Image: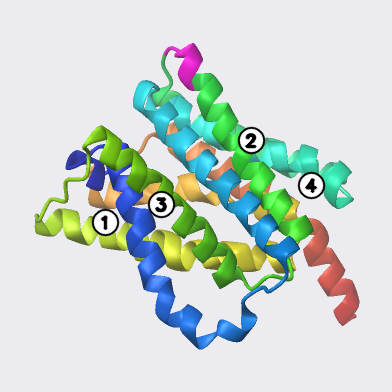
Amino acid sequence: MKIGLEFVSPMNFLRQRFIFSAIALVPYLLLTVRKFPKGSGTLLKLLVFSLINVASSIATLIGLVDQGSGIASVLTYTQPLFVFCLAIPFLKERVDTVRLLGAIVGFVGVVVLFSGTLGSFAFDATIILLLGAFLWGAAIVFYKRYLSQTYPLVANFSYLSMGAVILSIWSLVANDYAFPTDTTYIVSILYASLAGLSIAMTLWLFLIRVEDATVIAGSSFLVPVVALFLGWKFLGESLYLESTLGSALVLLGVYLVNLRRRNKQNSLKS
């Protein structure tokens, strides 16, 4: 995404991601047409889920424009904390002390990871980024409660199609629909679309479907760790002591979030 944004505006890049990702899922949808929801109630829930997700993506993108990447990353990964708060009343998930501690440790790890790039807060952008994180968490909880029986591929296609339509309208109004033909950009947009949204988002929804929302949300702390490593490997970005410490805290937090499930599986085997 960082490479792609060197060529086009954030909103245009997101629009193209939505379009390419939705198109890529069409062949698979045709093979699984029998799994399409038919009730009007489910279709309405899919619409709500898609709107929440699209709003989250747009809010995060707008916030990134006026906020430093360090603070933006930290604010975005308040998402698992929002999920923990929402999962208790809406999903009746049991959030024990160890799992809550894991979420807190993971979040502290993200703060440490980006401590070297934290700067001054832009108040408006901060609020928008927090809104994006909250909506991301709300989308997870909404899908788990109302759409967990819906085929993940269908739910993802609904979200991507909605995003493509909304941002295409915006592009027409803003006259911002350029598509660079540079090979680097084409590889970037295709990877960010096909791997990042078509495949990864479908897998993400599948995991939410079969696992506790708090576990999946807590495990998402791994994303900035992977991004940090890839930035060092492919973009020549530096790694510092806080990178190692932050990564260790994130891994510890994810371990603690998953500890109860691991203990449960071991007891079932015994």
Q: Mark 3–mark 2 contact, CB under 8 Å?
A: no
Find residue 5 and report its image quarter.
Answer: top left
Q: Is residue 248 above or below residue 183?
A: above
Q: Amino acid at mark 4?
A: Arg
Residue 181 is left or right of residue 26, and the answer is: left
* Distance between mark 3 and mark 2 Cα atoms: 23 Å
Q: Mark 3–mark 1 contact, CB under 8 Å?
A: no
Q: Which residue is mark 1?
A: 189
Q: Amino acid at mark 1?
A: Ile
* Distance between mark 4 and mark 2 Cα atoms: 19 Å
- Observer-nearest residue: 45 or 98? 45
Identified at 54% across, 50% down, the residue is 222
Report the residue that reaches farthest toward the left: 182
Q: Mark 1–mark 2 contact, CB under 8 Å?
A: no
Q: Amino acid at mark 2?
A: Phe
- Observer-nearest residue: 122 or 103? 122
Mark 4 residue element: helix
* Distance between mark 3 and mark 1 Cα atoms: 18 Å
Identified at 76% across, 42% down, the residue is 84
Q: Which residue is mark 3?
A: 165
Find residue 265 and report its image quarter.
Answer: bottom right
Please give the label number shown on residue 134.
2
N-terminal label among 3 and 4 = 4
Q: Which residue is mark 4?
A: 99
Mark 1 residue element: helix
